[in-house]
């Protein structure tokens, strides 16, 4: 038969011998397999039985299909056929049962389907190898009682049988030598389908396809056979169609329940059946939906506060004295501003920015400061409460000690194949593959240089967009009317040249972001493969770091430019600064500040990304779903086989969850890093995530093949990334409020420089604008007289610009006033105070809220105690039974021994 062990010198867990000569016997009798007169069911036909093809069982209707491999005949058929023959022979030696569906039975008449079943002996052996936890005793810990206000949440709950798909048990790693210790009622259903397909996939990834006399390490595993097209696909089966239950009574129909109670958008207000998701798809996908659902719940509180701050901006609309002064014809209408660009731009009236000043007030008001501080605390609460939720899930899903137990078993087959050098592991005392330090350093250097090159490419693209903004503004400026008494000509009905420049530049930047993302995804995967990470966890972490670093720069660089660079290095009339020595002048902010432009940039990039992502996720799958449904209706009932239905679905790639996490973490950055400029960002994110949860659920349930169940105790490297973004968000929001918003200059004026005894904002506009003598302008800074004759005939002698400098005629003319330094000091003080206040609160909250709930700690300790106690009792009882059996055998042997002649004589004499 075969022999399967936990260790080998070649770092594979499968050791095969000839099937006909093997004889395996286990002490407990569970895995006792002797030589058989009939061979194991292989690629033979069992077609005497009629079977509904829409089934997850072999033709005999008893053995469950745990995995399916598909392939087609092609030009290179002989080589591939030989690989398949060797691979399938080795699978049979492992103990797997195989059944082939001929291509004539398939819908396209060219695809073969190889169905795989793992019998109990194989499942038991590899469950021992993989240390899979299974129940040994029903849990005696009482569940938490419902609170008195829990009736309020009843409309949002799902039926109890959906939320708790199975009873609570105490679990322990499976040991085939102690099989009677565990609660095994039925061997066929003891391991759930997700565990069965995980075990089978583990065998497939480590099974070789070379001949016994030729050991070729590179010829191992289903991944390599898929990459060289020997097989076209490999996947476990869904248990039924998503819109109706399975016909077989033994089939769980979990896919149907997931679709009915989870994947439909009408269930958007319901809780998620996380236990059922975990049972069907595995812990890795379950933890993703748990995190996404928790993040969406926490967004609700941030959205409510953001809406309140926005409403405050609306209600205080009429009290905005600054905007009233700008719009007042007697104040803003008489202030002539200096040209915003050389030659092509003319002088302009301040009241032409009336509309944008009102718009800026909606987001740049006193409530914005409160919201920025609140979001700094909110992000801490989110991360701390998620740690508690994650700890509870780790316990409930038996993941507490998973990482330590599984880290060695997660070695990537690619690492084993590409690393030909071996060395002795000091812990296991076995030879294992390794990557030499010189090769590792060289690969790391190439990887780092590639990432740096692409980062510089993003910066170059941003500089190109900035150049576009400067050049196109001059073009828009030419649309201004010549009359000095009129406003700037509007482009359309409401958009002035400055806003038009910002919107078009943001749209172009967004298109560049999408193009660079598409290109870099392939580059990031290539350089990560080149580094040859050892474990799956290491591979995911490396790829996650590279992709997030790139997308961080790609998505946020334009926002950082508007927030922290635009309008900060302009100079002043007569001494402007230019972009890298070119003829393009650096951009200026509007009189009300750059915050409204940051809001515009944020809305376009954030909302555009969500729209494009949702269209990609929904539209193409909908078309595919329509085609599959049409194909299914064209078949007679029960003749569209389950394996063909799943074959027609999309394959769930190894990067499927990675892109889902990346999308949400980028969104998390938008609503934390720049939220001070747009309090409604959490509300938009909330609406998007409500849709995202159901859209992802719909895709997993209806569009994707069933993924191989995988374990994960947390969200991996994303935890650290979220922590870094949370800390950085406090700094960015403090700087936005200080340097991008006009809040600090207004407060300094209100409490220090306002005229009169009563604190009022009247006169702020005039105070915040400096005066420049037009005759002092350089020739290249002056507008063309031919294009702007009306302004030159108006006898204008001075113009105003946004800065705090002494007026002409002063002995320190055009140098910064003392008010400038007071404002700068106030900005720095605000940054220090806000950062310290938020960080102190963050650290206090983090210290106050324990990462693991006390209840979970108690349950973990009790379960550990019970496992030790029951194992001890089990071993003692087993030892007693063995001793009593040996005593009985000894007694029976003694009684059966023939009596000696002397004793017989004595007995005969007495009679």
Image (cartoon, helix red, strand yellow):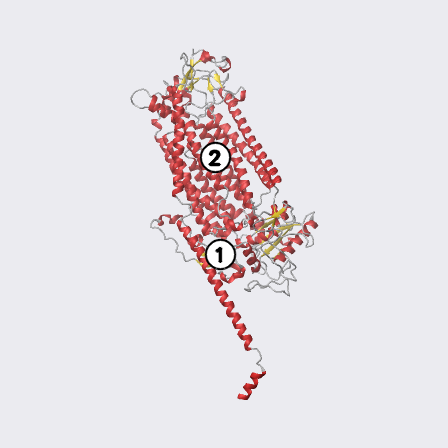
Mark 1 surroundings within 10 Å by alpha-carbon count, few (fewer than 14), some (14 through 19), many (20 or more): many
Q: Residue furthest front?
A: 902
Left or right, 12 with respect to 477, comes to: right
Residue nearest the viewer, comparing 14 with 840: 840
Asked if residue 101 shows in the view, the reply is no
Residue 606 image label: 2
Estimate the x, y position of residue 424 in percent, counting from the top left.
60, 48
Residue 680 bears which disc, if any?
Answer: none
Q: Secondary structure at mark 2?
A: helix
Taking the spot 66% from the left edge, 54% from the top edge, the residue there is 86
Can you see residue 9? yes
Q: In this orientation, which residue lies closer to the viewer: 542 or 360? A: 542
Q: Considering only vertical position in the picture, is 730 above or below 423? A: above
**In contact (CB < 8 Å): disc 1 and disc 2:** no
Q: Nearer the viewer, mark 1 or mark 2?
A: 1
From what the image shows, is residue 601 above or below residue 904?
Answer: above
Vertical comparison of 818 with 844: above or below: above
User: Helix, strand or loop at disc 1?
Assistant: strand
Give the quarter of the figure containing the N terminus.
bottom right
Quick check: 829 left or right of 459?
Answer: left
| Residue 403: % across, % down | 51, 49
Comparing 16 with 688, the one in front is 16
Residue bearing mark 1 = 172
- Residue 794 spot, x, y in % from top left: 43, 12
Q: How many marks?
A: 2
Rate crowding at label 2 as few (under 14), some (14 to 19) or many (20 or more) other CA atoms within 10 Å.
Answer: many
């Amino acid at each position: 038969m075969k022999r399967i062990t936990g260790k080998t010198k070649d770092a594979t867990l499968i050791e095969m011998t000839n099937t006909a000569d093997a004889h395996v016997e286990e002490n407990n009798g569970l895995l006792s397999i002797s030589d058989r007169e009939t061979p194991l069911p292989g690629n033979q036909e069992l077609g005497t039985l009629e079977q509904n093809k829409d089934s997850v069982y072999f033709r005999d209707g008893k053995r469950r299909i745990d995995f399916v491999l598909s392939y087609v005949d092609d030009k290179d058929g002989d080589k591939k056929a030989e690989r398949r023959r060797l691979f399938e022979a080795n699978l049979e030696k492992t103990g797997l049962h195989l059944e082939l569906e001929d291509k004539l039975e398939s819908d396209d008449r060219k695809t073969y389907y190889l169905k795989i079943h793992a019998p109990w002996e194989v499942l038991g052996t590899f469950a021992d190898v993989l240390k899979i936890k299974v129940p040994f005793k029903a849990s005696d810990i009482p569940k938490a009682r419902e609170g008195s206000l829990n009736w309020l949440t009843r409309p949002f709950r799902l039926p109890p049988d959906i939320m708790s798909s199975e009873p609570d048990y105490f679990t322990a790693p499976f040991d085939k030598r102690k099989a009677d210790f565990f609660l095994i009622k039925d061997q066929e259903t003891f391991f759930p389908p997700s565990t069965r397909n995980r075990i089978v996939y583990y065998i497939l990834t480590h099974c070789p396809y070379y001949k016994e006399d030729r050991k070729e390490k590179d010829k191992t595993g289903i991944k390599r056979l898929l990459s060289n097209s020997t097989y076209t696909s490999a996947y476990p089966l869904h248990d039924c169609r998503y819109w109706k239950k399975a016909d077989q009574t033994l089939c769980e129909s979990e896919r149907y329940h997931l679709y009915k109670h989870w994947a439909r958008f009408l269930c958007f207000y319901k809780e998620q059946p996380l236990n059922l998701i975990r049972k069907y798809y595995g812990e890795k996908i379950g933890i993703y939906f748990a995190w996404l659902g928790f993040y969406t719940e926490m967004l609700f509180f941030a959205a409510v506060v953001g809406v309140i701050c926005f409403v405050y901006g609306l209600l205080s609309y009429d009290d905005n004295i600054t905007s009233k002064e700008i719009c007042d014809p007697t104040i803003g209408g008489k202030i002539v501003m200096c040209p915003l660009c050389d030659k092509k731009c003319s002088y302009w009236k301040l009241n032409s920015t009336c509309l944008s000043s009102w718009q800026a007030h909606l987001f740049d008001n006193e409530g914005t400061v409160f919201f920025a501080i609140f979001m700094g605390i909110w992000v801490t609460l989110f991360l701390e409460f998620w740690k508690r939720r994650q700890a509870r899930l780790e316990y409930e899903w038996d993941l507490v000690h998973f990482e330590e137990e599984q880290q060695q078993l997660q070695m990537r087959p690619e690492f084993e194949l590409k690393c030909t050098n071996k060395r002795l592991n000091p812990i296991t005392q076995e030879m294992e593959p390794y990557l030499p330090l010189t090769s590792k350093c060289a690969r790391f250097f190439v990887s780092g240089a590639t990432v740096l090159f692409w980062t510089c490419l993003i910066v170059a693209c941003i500089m190109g967009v900035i150049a576009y903004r400067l050049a196109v503004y001059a073009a828009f400026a030419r649309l201004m009317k010549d009359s000095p008494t009129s406003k700037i000509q509007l482009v359309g009905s409401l958009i002035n040249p400055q806003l038009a420049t910002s919107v078009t530049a943001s749209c172009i930047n967004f298109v560049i972001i999408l193009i660079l993302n598409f290109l870099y995804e392939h580059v990031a995967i290539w350089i990560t493969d080149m580094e040859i990470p050892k474990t799956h966890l290491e591979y995911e972490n490396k790829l996650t770091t590279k992709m997030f670093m790139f997308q961080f720069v790609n998505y946020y660089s334009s926002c950082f430019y508007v927030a922290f660079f635009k309008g900060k290095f302009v100079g002043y009339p007569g001494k402007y600064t230019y972009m890298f020595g070119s003829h393009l002048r650096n951009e200026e902010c509007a009189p009300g500040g750059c915050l409204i432009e940051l809001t515009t940039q944020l809305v376009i990039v954030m909302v555009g990304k969500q729209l494009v992502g949702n269209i990609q996720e929904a539209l193409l799958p909908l078309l595919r779903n329509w085609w599959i449904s049409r194909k299914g209706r064209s078949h007679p009932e029960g003749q569209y086989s389950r394996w063909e239905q799943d074959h027609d679905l999309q394959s769930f790639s190894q990067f499927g969850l990675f892109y889902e996490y990346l999308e949400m973490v980028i969104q998390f950055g938008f609503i934390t890093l720049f939220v001070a400029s747009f309090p409604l960002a959490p509300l938009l994110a909330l609406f998007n995530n409500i849709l995202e949860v159901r859209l992802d659920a719909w895709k997993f349930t209806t569009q994707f093949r069933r993924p191989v169940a995988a374990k994960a105790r947390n969200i991996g490297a994303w935890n650290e990334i979220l922590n870094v973004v949370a800390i950085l968000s406090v700094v960015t929001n403090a700087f936005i409020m200080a340097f991008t918003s006009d809040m600090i200059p207004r407060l300094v004026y209100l409490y220090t420089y306002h005229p009169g005894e009563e604190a009022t904002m009247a006169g702020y506009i005039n105070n915040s604008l400096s005066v420049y003598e037009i005759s002092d302008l350089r020739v290249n800074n002056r507008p063309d007289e031919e294009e702007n004759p009306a302004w030159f005939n108006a006898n204008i002698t001075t113009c105003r610009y946004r800065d705090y400098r002494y007026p002409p005629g002063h002995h320190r003319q055009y140098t910064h006033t003392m008010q400038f330094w007071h404002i700068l000091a106030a900005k720095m003080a605000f940054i220090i105070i806000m950062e310290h206040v938020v960080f102190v609160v963050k650290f206090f909250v983090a210290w106050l809220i324990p990462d693991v709930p006390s209840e979970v700690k108690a349950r973990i300790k009790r379960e550990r105690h019970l496992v030790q106690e029951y194992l001890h009792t089990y071993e003692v009882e087993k030892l007693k039974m063995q001793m009593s059996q040996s005593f009985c055998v000894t007694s029976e042997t003694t009684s059966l021994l023939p009596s000696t002649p002397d004793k017989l004589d004595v007995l005969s004499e007495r009679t």
